[in-house]
Image (cartoon, helix red, strand yellow):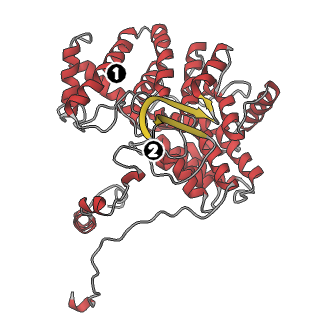
């Protein structure tokens, strides 16, 4: 029993769990009765206003004569359209993630000198404490890289003599170090997993301070550390598009909530990682890839739209793939007509698919993107439009880059740590009350009964 006590479920636990279910299930009608905004959103998906931010804006509608009209989705970082940001660094042949991180943190686009200095600082921080890889990552490998990442972040607290100092200069230093270290923590955790769980050769490459974040990820991950310029640039683009998404997404809201308590940076970021680890937030791109693998094995003719529509209908009727009734990668809590991140990423997916000889797969993705909204509209009652979100294409990008699925969500974290850091600093600068929403108790009053009378 001692060997599996932490993972086995005994009959006693099953019996106690049934008590949890029977005594903690709330009548769903009460949510309507008390006008509770479940998920802090109304029936149309509009979020409840709980804070103010200057970092990022997600726009999915315009207001005309006090009427909300859906529009093409837009994403702004510090007031600048993400599509203009991408156009700017891509046409100039530069990597954009570090520039985007600077913009999110400091609220302005850097000059060349400022960007060079910032990159130099990040490069200097791309080094873990002596013995950390051996003592923390290799000695206790996990099957889940997000677990490894969160545990590593919490452990770094012990290496920081000013861990609890919440002054802005100190928090900025901590955040920049974490931004720089996330690629190493993620990839080294994966290498340990592959070695100890799957018997693969263990190799630990060092980072190159002169390289971009995207280049270092590929350098660390691949046995020969080689990659093509297009591979690095598309990965860099994916990081830029995932860097932030406003204050209301689950993990960033977690950053604000936990920061408002006055706790340290490491605890805050670990909490945000725990949020992102949830499959409803950070794991959707893995599901998209797995769904397409199932589609490709069940649809004989990838150009037959009727056959594809039948498969999509089977997904919604819980007859295909994981039988969850979902078409993964379609729809978003905010966007209706389009997700600007998916729009931008799609342009580069086509280029990468040609380099990788995966044109047919890309064509299949575009066909599903076209047909899925039609099938959903026919099968489901929906309150707003449905379009492909960034997860629809990001998983395909990672597949073409030969990145392991275990790193898909950590890659999200490697990007989003920039946004989390900016939001943590913003919360501390504008510190008000601890965030504490209201919950209404709907339990009936019950008298205490003495133990002997129960």
- Mark 2 secondary-structure assignment: helix
Locate residue 73 relative to residue 160 in the image: left or right: left
Q: Residue at x 56, y 42 (%)?
A: 138
> Residue 277 has which mark?
2
Q: Residue at x 38, y 27 (%)?
A: 388
Locate residue 347 relative to residue 363 in the image: left or right: right
Residue 450 appears in the picture as rendered: yes
435 up-or-down from 142: above or below: below
Q: Quadrant of residue 240?
A: top right
Residue 206 appears in the picture as rendered: no
Question: Separation of disc 2 and disc 1 at Cα?
Answer: 26 Å
Give the position of the N terminus as an image quadrant.
bottom left
Neighbor class of circle 1 (other Cα within 10 Å; few <14, some 14-19, many 20+) is some
Residue ID for mark 1: 369
Q: Residue at x 39, y 52 (%)?
A: 39
> Residue 163 has which mark?
none
Q: Quadrant of residue 199?
A: top left
Q: Position of residue 112 (x, y in %)?
A: 79, 24
């Amino acid at each position: 029993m001692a060997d599996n006590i932490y993972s086995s479920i005994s009959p006693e636990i099953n019996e106690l769990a049934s008590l949890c279910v029977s005594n903690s299930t709330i009548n769903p009608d009460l949510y309507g009765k008390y006008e509770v905004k479940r998920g802090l959103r109304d029936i149309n998906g509009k979020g409840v206003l709980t804070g103010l931010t200057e970092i990022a804006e997600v726009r999915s509608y315009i207001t005309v004569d006090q009427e909300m009209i859906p529009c093409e989705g837009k994403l702004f970082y510090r007031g600048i359209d993400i599509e203009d940001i991408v156009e700017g660094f891509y046409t100039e042949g530069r990597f954009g993630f570090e520039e985007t991180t600077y913009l999110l943190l400091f609220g302005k686009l850097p000059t060349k000198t400022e960007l060079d200095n910032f990159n130099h600082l990040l490069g200097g921080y791309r080094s873990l404490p002596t013995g950390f890889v051996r003592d923390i990552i290799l000695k206790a490998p996990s099957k889940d890289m997000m677990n490894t990442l969160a545990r590593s972040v919490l452990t770094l607290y012990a290496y920081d003599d000013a861990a609890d100092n919440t002054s802005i200069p100190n928090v900025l230093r901590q955040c920049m170090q974490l931004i720089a270290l996330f690629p190493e923590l993620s990839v080294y955790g994966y290498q340990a997993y592959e070695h100890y769980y799957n018997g693969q050769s263990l190799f630990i490459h060092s980072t190159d301070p002169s390289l971009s974040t995207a280049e270092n990820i590929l350098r660390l991950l691949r046995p020969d550390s080689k990659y093509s310029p297009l591979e690095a640039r598309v990965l860099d683009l994916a990081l830029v598009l995932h860097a932030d998404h406003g204050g209301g997404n689950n993990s960033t809201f977690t950053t604000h909530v936990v920061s408002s308590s006055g706790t340290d940076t490491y605890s805050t970021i670990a909490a945000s990682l725990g949020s992102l680890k949830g499959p409803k937030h950070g794991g959707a791109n893995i599901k998209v890839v797995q769904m397409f693998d199932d589609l490709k094995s069940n649809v004989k003719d990838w150009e037959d739209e009727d056959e594809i529509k039948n498969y999509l209908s089977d997904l919604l009727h819980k007859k295909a793939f994981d039988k969850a009734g979902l078409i993964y990668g379609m729809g978003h809590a905010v966007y209706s007509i389009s997700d600007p991140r998916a729009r931008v990423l799609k342009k580069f997916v086509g280029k990468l698919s040609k380099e990788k000889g995966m044109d047919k797969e890309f064509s299949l993705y575009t066909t599903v993107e076209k047909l899925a909204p039609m099938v959903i509209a026919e099968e489901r009652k929906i309150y707003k439009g449905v379009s492909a979100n960034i997860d629809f294409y990001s998983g395909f990008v990672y597949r073409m880059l030969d990145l392991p699925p275990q790193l898909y969500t950590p890659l999200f974290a490697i990007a989003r740590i920039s946004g989390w850091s900016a939001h943590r600093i913003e919360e501390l600068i504008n510190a008000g009350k601890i965030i504490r929403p209201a919950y209404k108790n709907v339990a009936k009053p019950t008298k205490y009964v003495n133990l002997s009378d129960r």
